[in-house]
Amino acid sequence: MFGFVERAITQVGTTTVRIAREVGGIVVLAFDVLRALFPPTLDGRELVKNLYKMGNQSVPIVALTAFFAGGLMLVQSAPFVEKLQAHALAGWAAGYAVLREIGPILIALMFSGRVGANNTAELGTMTVTEQLDGLRALAIDPIRYLIVPRVVAMVVMLLALTVIGDLVALVGAAITAKAVVGIEFSTFIHSVVDNLKPYDFLHGIYKSMVFGASIALTSCYFGVTVRGGAVGVGRAVNAAVVAAAVSVMLLDFFMTYWLG
Amino acid sequence: MIELAAVRKRFGRHAVLDGIDLQVPTGARLGIIGPAASGKSVLLKLVCGLLRPDAGQVMIDGTDITERSEEGLAATRARIGFLFQNYALFDFMTVGDNVAFPLARRGGLAEDEIARRVSARLRAVGLAGNEAKMPAELSGGMKKRVGIARATIAHPEIVIYDEPTAGLDPVTTSKVYDLLRADQETTGATVIAVSSDVEALCRFVDTVAFLYQGKIRYQGAAQTLTDAPDPVVRQFVRGDLEGPLEG
């Protein structure tokens, strides 16, 4: 009995210390990145390369997901729209959910799975093959050369993908509205334009910026702290994806509360 | 002058270096040998400031680098060329870009001039015409030679080689050591080299230090290593199965 309690307490303590160490490491990395940004001395070639790799190549998957997510809003609400004859509010309902919540969260999670995981694996492999030490040995700061361009690219590109995803999701919702409930496009567009405020859009944009920074920092942190070869890289990717998803959900909760 | 004084380094409970005192005069060629996992690579990384000692001092030309920040170390590292045991080639760059990297980052040279020097350097290590290849397309021996080209292209004042000939055939090993010697004689650089190929290493360096159980057990002329008075050193150098060498 005492052995079980002791093991449980040890487990809780170990996990708490590990989480505290990881959160602390991510915060320190965030400060290092901020310090490197003032004045901005990031490598232009690395930035452009990462913008392309992380952003452009993510557009198809984000667009596909957003289209069906927007459509899903309408499929779920269609029975109530029909029952209450609320055709004029369908666009507003779908737009409100997409712009404020579904768009930023869904695209952030997709981004984390595709770009964040890839980033962790890449940096992790570079860490275990001593490439980061190779940079340091050549008097190059890996934070400025590798991390800062990736963080900037991820924040910028998640923002851009969220804007694209929002638009595609609304298109998906409009097409589904027409197909499932028979709502005309003009009615849907009026519903969106008349009822939604610019702040509804900005609300999601603010979130996506914070989500981008969070995914970037967690994926970079777990990448540069890899230990133990290929197995360690696998563990780091797993930890990065889980940490990013948890942080996105927690940040979404608090930001929704604060932003109103 | 590179000087290590009472340097200690632990990883967890394992004391890898346990009081290292070592001096490498400017322009000297020092070889470091020792059993596997005896801390040779750790020692090299301490000299470059890639690791910090738990105790003791690492001095380069009278300046203690152990307390310096990463930014403060940049000027020291710019004077050092480092060949890593596992090459540490940047896998997102071509061979040419890898070799050009130290020159390109330092600035002051036109792209044409950098390209010319890269070609010349790759030719010197027997890899002419491989500029456009990616590191993943190379064999281990080729990667090692690209690493040598990158470590030496900027003619650093201090050159650190971690297993410069591992994975190379005997003929290429001789060629590489001839090249390293010619480079050193031209530039007058201070060289520290770690190698498991003791015989070939001894033909390149002036003095050899034997690292064993966290300490420099022996330091002396490379030519007289096989006649070292310490039976542990003799057993290691001769590769005898029987003897006092542990592990």
Image (spheres, rainbow, N blue to C red):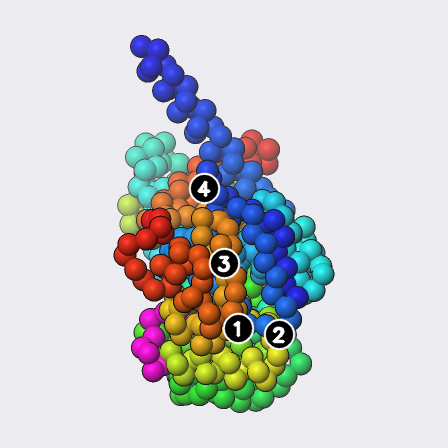
Question: Which circle, 4 or 2, is nearer the viewer?
Answer: 2
Residue B218: mark: 3
Q: Position of residue A156 (x, y in %)?
A: 54, 57
Q: Which chain does the numbered disc 3 sit on?
A: B
Dot label at residue B27: 2
- Characterize the magenta stretch by its predominant secondary structure: loop
Pointer 3 and pointer 1: residues touching (CB < 8 Å)? no
Image point (45%, 24%), residue name: A13
Q: Measured from the top left, where is residue A102 in percent x and y?
A: 43, 42
Which of the 4 image quadrants contains residue B89? bottom left
Tell me which label, 1 or 2, sits earlier in the chain: 2
**Residue type, label 2:** Gly
Q: Name the foreground residue: B67 vs B229.
A: B229
Element assignment for label 1: loop
Question: Which of the labelled discs sits on residue A116, or is there none?
Answer: none
Which numbered disc, 3 or 2, marks the residue closer to the eye? 3
As measured in the structure, the alpha-carbon distance from the residue carrying label 3 to the one carrying label 2 is 21 Å
**Label 2 lies in what chain?**
B
Q: CA distance from mark 3 to mark 4?
A: 22 Å
Q: Which residue is mark 1?
A: B206
Within-10-Å neighbours for mark 2: few <14, some 14–19, many 20+:
some
Q: Which residues are magenta?
A: B164-172
Determine if marks 1 and 2 fall on one subunit. Answer: yes
Q: Residues within 10 Å of mark 3 (few under 14, many from 20)?
A: some
Q: Earlier in the sequence, mark 4 or mark 1?
A: 4
Task: Judge whether A44 appears above or below A117 on screen.
Answer: below
How far separated are the C-alphas under marks 4 and 2? Answer: 33 Å
Residue A73 sits above or below residue B165 on the image = above
Q: Which mark is residue B14?
A: 4
